Amino acid sequence: MGNCGSPMEIDEGWLVITHGVGMARTYCLGAALLDRDDPSKVLKRTAQPILKPSAKERDGYVPNVVYSCGGMVHGRTLLLPYGVADNFASFASCSVDDLLTRMN
């Protein structure tokens, strides 16, 4: 597991987008919330991927991969550019509130 760009400050703490690889060598994205005053403390994180390769995003130079080098929060919306299979790029967005409710 690693991070995908700089942490983003939100009211609840520091939002970090993460990447990881599963058993079938599928790279997916997740998220974690760090304590604002002590970022070494993980408050919660997603148990399941927030973004994984779709059927259309599996083929490319490096198959089964989605990755990001960072996102931004605008208002309460996460905007996340991401690369697909080292072949093309796309964008995803979601509500920060919805993302936080998916975290344990």
Image (tube, rainbow, N blue to C red):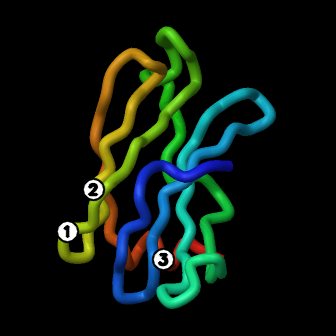
Cβ atoms under marks 1 and 2 closer than 8 Å: yes
Q: Is 19 on the left-hand or right-hand side of 60?
A: right
Name the N-terminal-most of marks 3 and 2: 2
Which corner quadrant holds the C terminus? bottom right
Q: Residue at position x 43%, y 51% from top? A: 5
Residue 46: image location, x then y, percent: 61, 65
Residue corresponding to mark 1: 74
Whether residue 70 is situated above or below residue 14 in the rendered picture: above
* Secondary structure at numbered mark 1: strand
Whether residue 85 is situated above or below residue 19 in the rendered picture: above
Q: Which mark is residue 79?
A: 2
Residues at marks 3 and 2, CA–CA distance in whole angstroms: 15 Å
Q: Is 51 on the left-hand or right-hand side of 70?
A: right
Badge 3 local density, few (<14 within 10 Å), some, or many (20+)?
Answer: some
Q: Residue at position x 27%, y 56% from top? A: 79
Residue 54: image location, x then y, percent: 49, 31
Residue 29: image location, x then y, percent: 54, 48
Q: Residue at position x 49%, y 64% from top? A: 16
Residue corresponding to mark 3: 100
Task: Inspect the image, locate mark 3, and give the three-letter code of the amino acid beneath it.
Answer: Leu
Task: Inspect the image, locate mark 2, and give the three-letter code of the amino acid beneath it.
Answer: Leu
Cβ atoms under marks 3 and 2 closer than 8 Å: no
Q: Quadrant of residue 25?
A: top right
